[in-house]
Amino acid sequence: MNYQYVVQRLLLALIVVLGVTFVVFMIMQIVPGDPARVILGPYASDESVAGLRDRLGLDRPFFEQYLGWLAKAARGDFGQSLLNGQDVAPQLWGRVGPSLELALVSLAVGLAIAFPIGIVSALKQGSLLDIVPTIFSQIGVSIPSFWMGILLILFFSLNLDLLPPSGYTPISEDVGDWLAHIILPAFTAGFVSASIQTRFIRSAMLDVLNANYVMTARAKGLAERAVILRHALRNALINIVTIIGLQITALFSGLVLVEIVFSWPGLGRLALNAVEERDYPLLQGAVLVIAIIVTIVNLLIDLLYFLLDPRIEYA
Amino acid sequence: MTIETISSKKRKPQAGETLGPANTLWRDAARRLLRHRLAMFGAAVLCIVIVMGVFGPAISPYDPNGMDFANRFAGPSLEHWMGTDDFGRDIFSRVIVGARVSLQVGLVAVSVATLFGTALGLIAGYSARATDEVIMRAMDVLYAFPAILLAIAIMAALGKGIDNAMIAIGIVYVPIFARIARAAVLGIRNEEFIIAAKAMGAGDIRILALHVLPNVLSPIIVEVTLSLAFAILAEAALSYLGLGTQPPDPSWGRMLSEGRAFYRQSGWMAFFPGFAITLTVMGFNFLGDGLRDALDPKLRR
């Protein structure tokens, strides 16, 4: 196995995380004018503005500020919320669980929709079983996730009264209630990502279905089922895993909105609340944690890709 | 397209003009595009949206901001095709006028992204390893953020409003154009016509602008169309979150968030603005896919 690839990939992830911290740090630096004044509003006294500037370290040289912030962030200290003065970090950790739960279930829902449809589309290329899903996936990528969420709430919660419109119950408290709350948001995010994945799974399958080894497998007299599952799908998986990896970032982007529509207590909703309250340390913490989660997931998927296909080399 | 058709068109190319084969390529692509049914459907939808955007206030049946308190929450009817909202404003008129914001933000944001992204990608693909690495790792960093989250963070720093939304969405899509442009440059940078241009003493900027850019144009055109779809979705999202368009101006995303409290009694307030977004985004997606098929027949399935 080519371990150089693994090392290079880890190094790249580290560089990206470092860059991410810099961008997140810059959020407060690019506030036009005096960030302390912007946070406190036009009626704050000069003393309190000066006090906040001092507390945030805004008077120190740029790189000193960044390195100081980075050193604290690396130890899990994201500063104090401007709103309630409490440490930001514990507020973030409480949100990671719900965010990851929703991400995982959404991904599972998306794949559960995309795999069968993508495979059948490829096998029946050009037939109605191919065209109808293709049109649906076109519609799926065009629907704003927040609008779809609203429509689902209208129909399933307000009209049919089947599922709760919003909120969250921890899985440790009541599994049934947790499930009832996660169905609509997970379906919303999952449907959008399924629309994209169906297309990629279809085209990855089409690629391998025309390959020589699939023809050989058929010529050997293998059952069609075995040809498709053992020979075609397995090879198509390599490409599919890459695509799923690329989709992870998009999935999280959609989840930010879905969390807000369904009042899901995740990091995305926390970030928006922080924006509304001009609570920059909280916003920085939330954005940083999400970006790091996305980077780690991407890294894991790249490494998985490496395990699936030993031929891969770092380009 | 065959070699014969290319060489049969013998005439002296003017300076800076693309040669015969390129013209044939574009004409072929146009023909394929016109035959692409979904692309034409998308183009038709977009024509309607553009007319709405350009002539909005002139063709809307009511004043989009005109309030009529006697007619609050009226359902869709012959007078008010899409009903009225909580201020008695005509939703159909607001949907028509709202097209302008979507198109404006889409065009400006994608122009920002195309300009900066393509330039960075061209430079990265054409430069020495070190410059390439620095640019592309910076792009990786921007790409590590979920798009909407990065836009929200940028808006948090710059402040609310439609101008900042354009900048934020533009920045978010820079890395995509950089990657596409770079990949396209890497594909051709060792081709003979580039080496020939170098041998003739052309400078880097001249080579990039006259020889490289025309050859990476088609993937960029496709991406521009698809990015317009994303940019319109992103604007709607930011406005829905209250960060983009500010009241009372109608924008599709804002209308969705304004109606939030009244969805139970008047579902049409939730339906029509979202439907307009979906249709417009679908128009760009269809056209983009059609362009891709038309410009790169090899990829066709």
Image (cartoon, rainbow, N blue to C red):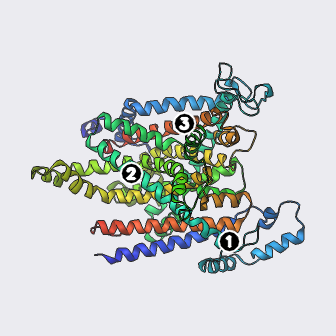
Q: Secondary structure at mark 1?
A: helix
Residue B181 in view in this figure:
no
The residue pinned by badge 3 equals B280
Residue A310 in view in this figure:
yes
Q: Position of residue B189 (x, y in %)?
A: 38, 59
Q: Position of residue A16 (x, y in %)?
A: 51, 70
Is residue A268 positioned above or below B85 on the image?
below
**Who's the residue at 79% across and 73% down the image?**
A53
In the image, A134: left or right of A42? Answer: left
What is the CA distance from the residue labelled 1 to the residue labelled 3? 40 Å
In the image, A58: left or right of B217? Answer: right
The residue pinned by badge 2 equals A112
Question: Callout 2: few (<14), some (14-19), or many (20+) C-alpha neighbours within 10 Å?
Answer: some
Chain letter of the residue carrying label 3: B
In the rendered structure, are the residues bearing label 2 and label 3 in contact, judged by CB atoms less than 8 Å apart?
no
Q: Secondary structure at mark 3?
A: helix
Identify which amino acid the numbered label 1 is placed on. Answer: Val
Residue B39 image-quadrant placement: top left
Instruction: Please name whichever residue, B10 or A237, is drawn nearer the observer in this view of the structure.
Output: A237
* Disc number lying in front (2 or 3): 2
Instruction: Please name whichever residue, B295 or A4, is drawn nearer the observer in this view of the structure.
Output: A4
What number is the disc on residue A88? 1
**Quadrant in which the C terminus of chain A is drawn:** bottom left
The reply to whether label 1 and label 3 mark residues of one chain is no
Is residue B31 positioned above or below A202 on the image?
above
Residue B264 image-quadrant placement: top right
Q: Position of residue A268 (x, y in %)?
A: 60, 59
Identify which amino acid the numbered label 2 is placed on. Answer: Ala
